[in-house]
Amino acid sequence: MIDVDGYLAVLGTTRPAAPTAEALRALHRAQVERVAYENLDIHLGRPTGIGAAESVDRIVRGRGGYCFHINGAFGALLTALGYDVTLHRAGVQGTPADPAGAHGDHLALTVRLDGERWLVDPGLAGGIHEPLPLREGSYTQGPFTYAMAPSVPAPGGWRFTHDPRGAFTAMDFAPEPVRLSSFAAEHTRLSTSPDSGFVRVLTAQLRDAKGVDVLRGCVLRRIHAGGTDERVIDSADDWYDALGDVFRLDLTDVDGPARAELWHRVRTSHEEWEAAQR
């Protein structure tokens, strides 16, 4: 069982009377606007699981996670509200040079509703604001334009192509249903391996109707219709203020020494990155 009422309170929504398309869109918008895609616990040295109930509890406490947490929790919420949800093995293609395919580093969700299937993916960093129909075509949401097409590397599945200004190139997902537990080994790799982007760089991202806010290390960006605004945060107070004010993260359980250590490591990593650019 999951805490449905607590979850809906975080989203600022009420329990829908029925599992309608309108309610699904509202839930998805609320999820991406109020629950950050973030990996702070990796950098705080706090191992997490990906069980749906545990991830829902994280969200109720004012935290987020990455795809296994966010989509696992959101899928469980939708199921509890009466939606027909399927979990899919997926893969994110970071750049055009990276391999495509449903290689398992992402969990995608689809919902069957009124005879049509929808991609429902609040755990796709800086991705869609509302669900997309699984129909080939181009779709515009706010300042971003996406494409949906049958997947070549994942036959029978679908390929979502991100706007060129997005954090990744595309995502493929396979058609077969999977269990959340099947991602446990990949979660361990992504959260512990020194080769993992989640381990190398702290990030937080939050989508809204007009764009996306992205924090990578000390660099805060706002991507919107007019372009990209960027600034480097150079003080711990401003950095923690951004996590709370921009990304809605509740860090009251992180004490002073842990905050100081985290900031030191993030700032040191940023300075090393700057030095490498010179």
Image (cartoon, grey):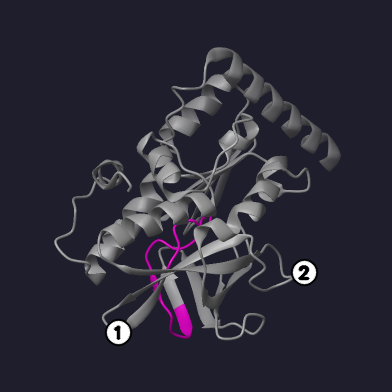
Q: Which residue is mark 1?
A: 115
Q: Position of residue 188 (x, y in %)?
A: 66, 47
* Above or below, comparing residue 152 to residue 112 in the picture: below
In the picture as drawn, the residue positioned furthest to the left comes out as 17
Q: Earlier in the sequence, mark 2 or mark 1?
A: 2
Along the line of sight, the residue nearer the viewer: 116 or 247: 116
Label 2, label 1: how far apart the Cα atoms are: 37 Å
Along the line of sight, the residue nearer the viewer: 110 or 181: 181
Q: Which residues are magenta?
A: 120-138
Q: Main secondary structure of the magenta part?
A: loop
Q: Is residue 80 left or right of residue 46?
A: left
* Above or below, comparing residue 192 to residue 160 in the picture: above
Question: Which residue type does callout 2 highlight?
Answer: Ala
Q: Is residue 13 left or right of residue 148?
A: left
Residue sitting at x 30%, y 64%: 25
Label 2 CA crowd tier, 10 Å (few <14, some 14–19, many 20+): few
* Above or below, comparing residue 147 to residue 58 in the picture: below
Q: Position of residue 82 (x, y in %)?
A: 25, 65
Q: Which residue is mark 2?
A: 97
Q: Position of residue 112 (x, y in %)?
A: 34, 76
Residue sitting at x 51%, y 44%: 65
Q: In the rendered view of the protein, which quadrant contains the C terminus? A: top right
Whether the magenta-drawn stretch holds residue 130 is answered as: yes
Residue sitting at x 73%, y 33%: 270
Q: Position of residue 145 (x, y in %)?
A: 49, 71
Residue 164: quadrant of the picture: bottom right
